[in-house]
Amino acid sequence: MSALPASAQVVVIGGGVMGASTAYHLAARGVRDVVLLESQRFFGQGATGKCAGGIRYQFSTAINIRLSQLSLPMLDRFEEEIGQAIGLRYDGYLLLATNERDVATFQRNVELQHSLGVPTEWLDGDEVRRRVPQLAAGDVLAATFHAGDGLADPHGVVAGYIAAARRLGARAYNEAPVTGIDAAGGRVTGVHTPLGRIACETVVNAAGPWAGVVGAMAGAPLPITPVRRQMVTTGPLPALAPDFPFVIDFARSLYFHREGEGLLTGMSNPDQAPGFDESVDEEWELTHLEAAVTRLPLLAEAGLQARWAGLYENTPDAHPIIGRVPQFDNFVVVTGFSGHGFMHGPIAGLLVSEIVLDGQAHTLDISELGYERFAGRTTREYNVI
C-alpha cells in the first residue's frame, strides 16, 4: 500500500456508497486533493455491501421522496456516466397493509407521492391476490405499488464511484481506519490513522453506522444508533413468477425480492438491541423464516444459500443528517439514513460536494436534514423496513 499523504484538501471517512459518492462528486467539481479512508480491506463491505439493494420512491415524507427523485435518475445514468454496470432492474415495490392503521397511513402516503409526481398505485386486497397469486395474502387489506421502484447492485455502485473518483485524481485507501481527529479553534485540523496523520481543510464523516464513533473522536456527538439487520438468500425457485415484485409485509417488516434464480428475504427484529454485532442471530432467523414461509409458501421448497447480517444507522426520526455540525464549520456529516441510504447515496454525495465547495446545498433544499433539527420537533419517516 502506498503511504498516505501528509495533507489533503478534503478527507472523506468511510468507503461505502456515501463516501464513494462524495469523493467522486468532489473530484468531478475539480477538487483533486481528496483522500478517502476506508477501514476495511475492500470498499463497500460495511453497511452498503450488506444491504438488500432496494431503490424506491415510496416514502412518507416529502424530503425523502425528493431525494429519491434526484438520486434514482442518477442510477439510471450510472453506467453511461460512470462506466460501471450496476444490475439495475425495476421489479416494482409492493407494500402490503394488513391492519387499518397502515391502510390509513398508506393512503396519506400515496396522496403525498401523487402530489409530488410519483404515480404510486393503490390496490385493494383482491387486486393484490390477483397480481401476486403466490403470496398467501388472505389477510391483506390493501397495498401500494410503484413500478418505478426496483433494485441495483451496491457493490457495482461503490466500485464505479471509486474508480471514477480515482480517474479524476482522488486517492482512496483501504485498511486505513481513522483513530483520532484533531481540532482547534472551532475547526478540524487533521485525522490520525495507523498509517499516519493527514492534515486537512475539511473532513466529511461518511462512516455509516460508525459515524457516531467518528463524531465522538472530534467532540461532535451524533444521534446515530447502529442496529443489526439480517437476511438470507435461497437456492433456485423455478416456480417463482418472473415478474415477482419486491414485496414488503409492512406490519412484520418482512420482505422478499428475486435474487438470481431464488429469493432474498429479511425481517427486522423489533427487539434488536443496539450495537455493532454483525453475527447472524440464528434464533431470529428461524422466526423470520417461519413468517416468510407463512406469507410465501413457495419458500418451503427452497434451500438456504447464504446468510449474513449488517447494520442500519438509525436516527431518532429515521431521516439522514446531511450538513455541518455546530461545533466545527469544516466537519460535514452524511449519515443516519436509517436503512435507505444506498438508494440516496448518489444525490447525497452531490449535495455534500455543494456544502463543501459552495457553502450550502443548492440542488435541493435540505435544511430540514441538518443536525440542528434535533433541538426541536421532528417528523418521522414511516416507511422504514
Image (tube, grey):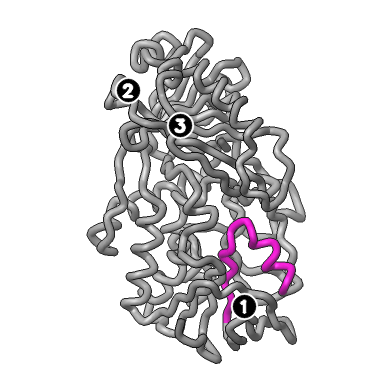
Name the side, left or right, on which 166 lies relative to 125: left
Toward which corner of the image does residue 206 lie, by quadrant? bottom right
35 or 110: which is nearer to us? 35
Q: Which residue is mark 3?
A: 304
The numbered disc on residue 240 is: 2
Give amino acid for label 1: Asn
Determine the residue positioned at 36% across, 13% down.
133
Q: Is residue 264 visible from the viewing direction of this image?
A: yes
Q: Helix or strand or loop: what does disc 3 sit on?
A: strand
Nearer the observer: mark 3 or 2; the answer is: 3
Q: Is residue 106 above or below residue 314?
A: above
Q: Position of residue 304 (x, y in %)?
A: 45, 31
User: Which amino acid type is shown beneath numbered disc 3?
Assistant: Leu
Measure the C-alpha gap from mark 1 to mark 2. Answer: 51 Å
Q: Which residues are magenta?
A: 202-217
Q: Earlier in the sequence, mark 1 or mark 2?
A: 2
